Each structure stands twice: as structure tokens, then as C-alpha cells.
Image (cartoon, helix red, strand yellow):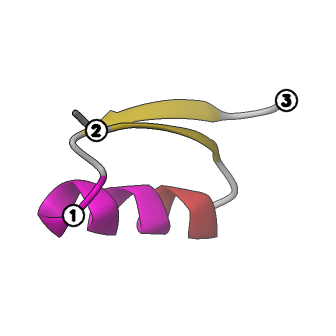
Amino acid sequence: MVKVAIVTGAGQGIGLAIAKRLHADGFKIGIVDY
């Protein structure tokens, strides 16, 4: 089963760190930053 996560505020800081960690854990990532 494919794991998918949408991370808001992932352009920098903690959102970016969370997105990188989820990707390392095998998630497909959708990144949103405004």
C-alpha cells in the first residue's frame, strides 16, 4: 500500500524537516507552501 502525505508550510523550517523525514520513511509527498 502506498503511503501519501501532504505537508503544508514545507518550503522551510519544521515543515521541510517533516517532509524530508516522511520521504525517508517511504511516503509519497505533496508539498504546499505559499
Spatial CA distance of label 3 from label 1 is: 29 Å
Query: Label 1 amino acid?
Result: Gln
Reading the image, the residue beneath label 2 is 33
The secondary structure type at the circle numbered 3 is: loop
Circles 1 and 2, Cβ within 8 Å, touching? The answer is yes
Kind of residue at badge 2 = Asp
Quarter that holds the N terminus? top right
Residue under label 1: 12
Q: Is residue 15 above or below residue 9?
A: below
**Whole-percent x, y for residue 25 in the image:** 60, 63
Q: Residues within 10 Å of mark 1 (few under 14, many from 20)?
A: few
Q: In which quarter of the image is the C terminus?
A: top left
Highlighted range, magenta = 11-21
Q: Nearer the viewer, mark 3 or mark 1?
A: 1
| Residue lying at 80% horizontally and 32% vertically, measured from the top left | 2
Q: Distance between the residues labelled 3 and 2?
A: 27 Å
Tell me residue 20's x, y (percent): 46, 67
